[in-house]
């Protein structure tokens, strides 16, 4: 089952306003060390992205260069520790269809009060999925202000010891969705078990 701590982190991420033991995502082909999990991302059309890497947070941020995309677009890929290697299907279903939309409604109500009705947060879709054979949750949330609308797609992939968080943000819902799919399609996961322990002392 998903831990309360992890669930809280996931829900807290959805409450934020729309933005104006693992290795960080890196170039494809980088081998994983023993006892580690690595995520390699084959970035679609790499020349059109400005890339910012945060090794400490195991996160890479891709921002589309001016005029390189139909609309403004940002992608964040982050590796976090998974609460469990094998998430319970019912727990994932509840996270997708109950907990995430509920958090969005609560955040929307709070922001409407603060902004005097000028800002609103709405869940477009939230459901379970599967990517590369791993269970996942996908969510698309709409952030509305008086003069702008931004869509944020969030995908959580539970890949063994790691949870991969992919977030795409754009004024275009279709662009955010198709870009997330393209990044996920180019992902390669590698887990290498630790070296076997050597026997200690003399055996008889």
Image (tube, helix red, strand yellow):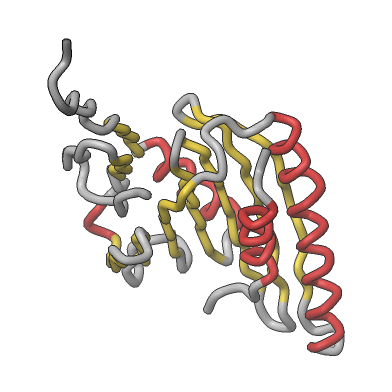
Residue 3: where, in percent of width, then height?
A: 65, 48
Residue 16: give x, y in percent of width and height. 64, 73
Residue 60 lies left or right of residue 159; in this view the side is left
Residue extending farthest left: 202
Residue 115, given in percent of the width and then of the height, sits at 79, 88
Along the line of sight, the residue nearer the viewer: 64 or 166: 166
Q: Quadrant location of residue 13?
A: bottom right
Q: Height in image: 61 above or below 180? A: below
Q: Residue at x 44, y 39 (%)?
A: 161
Residue 183 image-quadrant placement: top left
Q: Nearer the viewer, residue 89 or 169?
A: 89
Quadrant of image for the C terminus: top left
Position of residue 10 in the picture relative to residue 94 (left or right): left
Residue lying furthest front: 204
Q: Residue at left 52%, top 33%?
A: 85
Residue at 73% x, 45% y: name it. 95
Q: Position of residue 77 (x, y in %)?
A: 41, 55
Q: Quadrant of the N terminus?
A: top right
* Whether residue 49 is situated above or below residue 139 in the rendered picture: below
Q: From the viewer's perspective, is residue 184 above or below residue 152? A: above
**Callout count:** 0
């Amino acid at each position: 089952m998903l831990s309360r701590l992890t669930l809280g982190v996931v829900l807290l991420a959805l409450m934020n306003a729309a933005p104006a033991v693992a290795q960080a995502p890196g170039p494809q082909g980088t081998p994983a060390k023993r006892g580690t999990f690595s995520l390699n991302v084959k970035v679609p059309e790499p020349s059109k992205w400005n890339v910012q890497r945060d090794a400490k947070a195991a996160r890479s941020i891709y921002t589309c260069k001016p005029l390189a995309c139909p609309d403004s677009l940002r992608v964040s890929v982050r590796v976090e520790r998974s609460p469990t290697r094998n998430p319970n299907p019912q727990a994932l279903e509840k996270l997708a269809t109950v907990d995430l939309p509920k958090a969005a409604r609560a955040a929307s109500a709070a922001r409407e009060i603060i902004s005097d009705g000028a800002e609103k947060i709405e869940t477009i879709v939230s459901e379970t999925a599967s990517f590369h054979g791993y269970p996942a949750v996908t969510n698309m949330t709409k952030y509305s202000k008086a003069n702008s609308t931004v869509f944020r797609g969030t995908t959580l992939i539970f890949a063994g010891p790691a949870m991969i968080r992919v977030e795409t943000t754009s004024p275009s819902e279709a662009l955010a969705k198709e870009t997330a799919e393209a990044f996920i399609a180019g992902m390669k996961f590698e887990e290498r078990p630790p070296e076997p322990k050597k026997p200690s002392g003399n055996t008889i």
